[in-house]
Image (tube, rainbow, N blue to C red):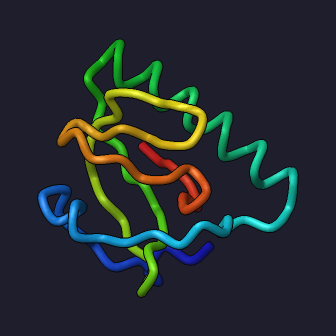
Amino acid sequence: MIVSDFERIEKEKMEQLKFPKRDVLKSARDIEDRSSELSRALVEARQNNARLKIYFEDEKSRKVVETSIWGLTNKQVILDSHVGIPISRIHSVKP
């Protein structure tokens, strides 16, 4: 993943995005790593109110948003703006 390939987006504009169903990651190992990253990010957010960079892909392009994670379901990451990103569309989560 090359970070410069991701366009920055403000969390306030997240509601306007549309997400395809297919996963952006191909290998089982990458999907497992993403799951671990998300779990760690949720713990960090709850303990320290940490802001993270979430690298993801909508129907048009690769994007990155800097925000806090408020929740995690089986299918979505819930952001502090109460908007969700489908887990299957997330490339990675970084501090």
Residue 27 location in percent, x, y? 86, 61
* On-image quarter of the C terminus: top left
Residue at 27%, 47% in the rendered image: 83
Residue 19's quadrant in the figure? bottom left
Left or right of 44, for residue 31: right
Establish if 66 lies above or below 50.
below
* Residue furthest right as drawn: 28
Residue at 47%, 83% in the rendered image: 5
How many circles with numbers are drawn on the protein? Answer: 0
Of residues 38 and 73, the one nearer the viewer is 73
Of residues 4 and 21, the one nearer the viewer is 21
* Residue furthest top as drawn: 47
Establish if 5 lies above or below 79.
below
Residue 92 location in percent, x, y? 56, 55
Residue at 39%, 27% in the rendered image: 71
Residue 81 location in percent, x, y? 18, 42
